[in-house]
Amino acid sequence: MIKIPAEKLKSILVKEGLIEPAQFEDIRKEAERLNQNLTEVLISRRIMTEEYFIDFLSRYFNVSKADLAAKKINERVFSFLSQNLARQKQAVVFDQEPDGTFDVALEDPGNLETIEFLEKHLKGRIKVFLATEDDLARVFALYGQKSAEEFKKIIEENISASLKLTLKGEEEAALEVPIVAIVDNFLSYAISLNASDIHIEILEDVILIRYRIDGILYEILRIPKEVLPAIVARIKLLAGLKIDEHRKPQDGRFRYKIIGEMMDIRVAIMPTFYGEKVEMRLLRATAKPMSLGELGLLEDTIKIIEENIKRSYGMLLVCGPTGCGKTTTLYAILNILNRPSVNIVTIEDPIEYYIPYVNQTQINPQAGITFANGLRAFLRQDPNIMMVGEIRDEETAEIAVHSALTGHLVLSSLHTNDAPTAVPRLMDMRVVPFLAAAVLNVILAQRLVRRICQSCLESFTPSLGLIAAIEQQASLQGAKIRVPKTFYQGKGCSACNQSGFSGRLGIFEVLNISDAVRNLIVSPNFSLDALKTLARKEGMISMFEDGLRKVELGLTTLEEVLRVIRE
């Protein structure tokens, strides 16, 4: 995020009535304490929107917005700047004017050093445009697409070289140049495609390489199985795992700099019938918690959550299956709550993002640190807010509930299909109804859907089959659902690799625990159906309905919503 002189930003925001001078100074101090950019804090606190800030930057630097989502990128010239340099400088060349001037989109149009460097590198004049994060991501996706053939060629060359090696052991193989190059290219290519995971799987006669992109697994490459031991040994060496251990699962982590970015890479190795399977989760080391709006929550939902986290005690639960973004949502809420007046402690498995001034602990069963033990120990640390990565068992549930009863705000996650089901799930873990009713503040359930690529967004008339699918899902929920007036889809373009999707966002349902809901929970007539009926009566919007709202806004497709709802 670009740094703007604080006084300049203050004068504009005060003049436009967006903030009071004293409030601005408080937020400035908070940004310094958290070591965050002032504008990031202002956006996360909803003093201004990201759209407003982009318009502000455009006026401040007197440059036009690149708006690459609506422009056709001249692929002939964008490659004048290598991917490595583009990422390093956060700049892309997207067109060339008749007089030879290069159109360059910059994240920071005020960086004179970068502008001077680009003019020398391109050997010509440049016209500066303001680039958003989405603008840069679109061009970086093009780099990834262009590098596919080069990636496969490099991998094939290094595999051929590795098969010619005569080595004494796995550790020696892990240090050889061809094997190092293979692993490096697996990682760099995954990052260029914005993949979240790399799967290295061994079949009977071949190794399968798959990347998870926007939540969907894609086959990338097949390579000879003879190189698997050396590749696995290389990954084990980087992650600090035992190279000679092949019978037990192993988990590790390492930090790696690739294409100008520092990445945290989480490694999980599992023995299978034909050999060891490797899964690598890619996390940007510099990534910061997202705002609730960035996650995909709409204004009415954000308001409910913000009202509930103002309470000094009680419990907030985020529910959903594995990989649906529960932890990311918890981090976003923690970021809002993180201020000098509170002591925040977390116990996680694993720590995915580091948050300044939050005391984060990772579970380590070998050292006796479990969710339950860690939570119990944290009660002696004088906490105000506690975050438990997941409530998995009766002991953790009991301690979390009693913590919420004794003046602590507890945030946690639970594996359930929807928000109302969290209540009987707690009861299954022997939390008595009156305690559940007493501690629960709000329950949030979510799924992740693929976001329509804004570069190739188009509207279309839905088929009768789509309308029927909506009506069928509505009848299953026993709700009257309004069919969106307009439907959208991604036609497919170079920016999204012809998929029609780019990135992901959440669809949510929020169960606000009102007095009526509390009375129902402790009632002898409690049932899940009764709770769902009452929740809908009190205005709860289901995940399906929230998904339909995002379909109408052109953020996702109906097929995506139905896919995750039915999973």
Image (cartoon, rainbow, N blue to C red):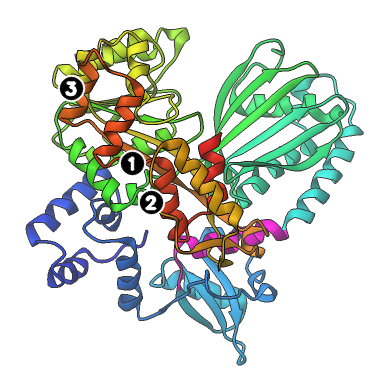
Check the image and name the residue furthest to the right. 164
Query: How many residues crowd mark 3 within 10 Å: few (<14), some (14–19), many (20+)?
Result: some
Real-space Cα distance between discs 1 and 2? 9 Å
Q: In the depicted view, which residue is nearer to us: 97 or 178?
A: 97
**Residue type of the residue flagged with mark 2:** Glu
Residue 469 in percent (x, y) is at 55, 47
Q: On the image, which quarter does residue 402 sit in?
A: top left
Real-space Cα distance between discs 3 and 2? 35 Å
Sequence-first tag of 3 and 2? 2
Check the image and name the residue furthest to the bottom. 99
The residue pinned by badge 3 equals 519
Q: Which residue is depicted at the point 46% across and 60% down? A: 133
Residue 440 in percent (x, y) is at 23, 25
Q: Which residue is depicted at the point 63% across and 51% down? A: 193
The residue pinned by badge 1 equals 332
Asked if the residue under mark 2 is in contact with the one under mark 3, i.e. CB atoms within 8 Å, the reply is no
Residue 263 colored magenta? no
Tag shown at residue 222? none
**Residue type of the residue flagged with mark 1:** Ala
Relative side of 285 to 249, left or right: left
Sequence-first tag of 1 and 2? 2
Residue 129 in percent (x, y) is at 46, 76
Q: Is residue 353 in view?
A: no
Residue 404 in percent (x, y) is at 20, 20
Q: Quadrant of the N terminus?
A: bottom left
